[in-house]
Image (cartoon, grey):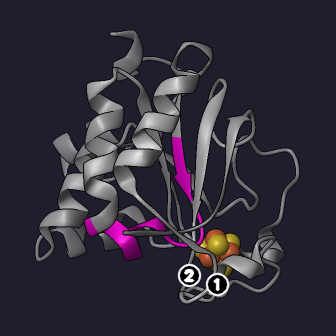
Amino acid sequence: MLRLAGMHPDSIVDGPGIRFSIYVQGCPHRCPGCHNPETHDPGGGYEADSEELSALIGKYRPGIDGVTISGGEPFEQAPALVPLAGKVVEEGLNLVLYSGYSFEELLSKSRQDENIHRLLEAGWLLVDRPYLLEERDLNLAFRGSRNQRLIDLKASLAKGEAVEWTGSGNDPARM
Ligand code: SF4
């Protein structure tokens, strides 16, 4: 079972295009100035079934460009998210993941944790690193502080190091 804080079926701020956004519950990072402090408590929110969520996304399928999983910290719930991420990819939708961990930290974790590995592999873009209040910038696309990056996951996993997304290409939903 997933633990969620909420969802938004047609978000335009959580990645390119119109996105079905899922916000998971529970975050260990506790960034000062976080806009979603209600998502921090891992015991808060509500339980959701991955298959029911996949079916719900399917109903919005014609009107969305992709799915975003944000938080909270998605990678704390990797085992429950892997089946959902697989369905998203099967449906031909692209997947954007947010994390307070850096790509490098997640890559290191993925060597010991198959679910983190599979979640990274299912993703198209990763918005990584914690929100830093002192680097807050309201003009950035899809992120809140300048230290955060838009990572092209396919290119980064192939290279074994972070490759920042240039804003075009490599979208599995358009290939
Ligand atoms: S990682 Fe995201 S949800 Fe977690 S505390 Fe930082 S800004 Fe908030």
Q: Which residues are magenta?
A: 68-79
* Circle number at residue 111: none
Displayed quadrant of residue 142:
top right
Q: Which residue is mark 1?
A: 40
Asked if marks 2 and 1 touch (Cβ < 8 Å), the reply is: yes
Q: Where's residue 78, x and y in %?
A: 31, 66
Label 1 beta carbon within 8 A of ligand 1 = yes
Counting residues from the start of the chain, the first of labels 2 and 1 encountered is 2
Q: What residue appears at the point 64 percent right and 64 percent down from the top-left corner? A: 147
- Ligand 1 location (quadrant): bottom right
Residue 125 makes an appearance in the image: no
Q: Where's residue 151, x and y in %?
A: 45, 46
Label 2 secondary element: loop
Residue 119 makes an appearance in the image: yes
Along the line of sight, the residue nearer the viewer: 127 or 113: 113
What crowding class fits label 1: few (fewer than 14 Cα within 10 Å), some (14-19), or many (20 or more)?
many
Label 1 secondary element: loop
Q: Magenta segment: does it hold 175?
A: no
Q: What residue appears at the point 65 percent right and 23 percent down from the top-left corner? A: 17
Q: Quadrant of the N terminus?
A: bottom left
Along the line of sight, the residue nearer the viewer: 68 or 164: 68
Q: Which residue is mark 2?
A: 27
- Callout 1, which amino acid? His
Along the line of sight, the residue nearer the viewer: 91 or 170: 91
What crowding class fits label 2: few (fewer than 14 Cα within 10 Å), some (14-19), or many (20 or more)?
many
Displayed quadrant of residue 82:
bottom left
Q: Is residue 154 left or right of residue 68?
A: left
| Vertical side of 64 occupied by 105: above or below | below
Label 2 beta carbon within 8 A of ligand 1 = yes
